[in-house]
Image (cartoon, rainbow, N blue to C red):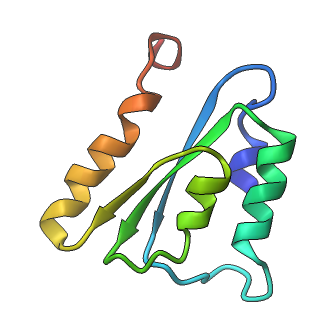
Amino acid sequence: QQAAAMVDGKNKEAFILLISDGENSCDKDQDVCALAAQIARQKPRLKINVVDIGGAKGANCVAHATKGKVFTANNQKQISSMINQAVKPMQTEEVCK
């Protein structure tokens, strides 16, 4: 929610990378799937890509709600590879200037 507040996502494209082990460790009472759906309504041009560590799938709904992608890392070696794949769409000239 805090990251979404820092980017546009309404008037221009925006991206967030979420790395998750599937556990909601911030606010146990917060439904991350419902929150993602709310953010998607407020910021339709925001895409959240998720790196799912271990295939836990707990945060995959965030990617689906925001039309982002899920990248699953099943072991330590795959984590950096999946992160690199997940950030590729975020690397645009405008962002890198």
Image height check: is 6 above or below 58? above
Q: Please give left or right for residue 38 compared with residue 24 in the image.
A: right
Q: Nearer the viewer, residue 27 or 67?
A: 67
Tally the marks.
0
Say whether residue 24 is left or right of residue 70.
right
Specify the quadrant of the image occupied by residue 79. Answer: bottom left
Taking the image as shown, residue 36 lies to the left or right of residue 76, namely right
Question: Which residue is found at the position 42% from the left and 30% from the top?
Answer: 89
Residue in view at x 60 percent, y 40 percent: 47
| Residue at the image position 66 percent from the left and 47 percent from the top | 66
Q: Position of residue 95 (x, y in %)?
A: 51, 20
Q: Compared with residue 83, is residue 57 higher up or lower down, i.e. above or below?
A: below
Please state, as top left, top right, bottom left or bottom right, where the N terminus lies in the image.
bottom right
Indicate whether 39 appears above or below 59. above
Q: Check the image and report above or below for 71 versus 7.
A: below
- State the residue in front, 96 or 56: 56
Quarter of the image where one finds residue 27: bottom right
The residue at 18%/61% (across/down) is 78
- Counting from the top left corner in percent of width and height, residue 54 is at 31, 77
Residue 65, image x, y percentages: 67, 54
In the picture as drawn, the residue positioned furthest to the bottom comes out as 28
Q: Position of residue 90 (x, y in %)?
A: 46, 30
Along the horizontal axis of the image, is 28 left or right of 79?
Answer: right
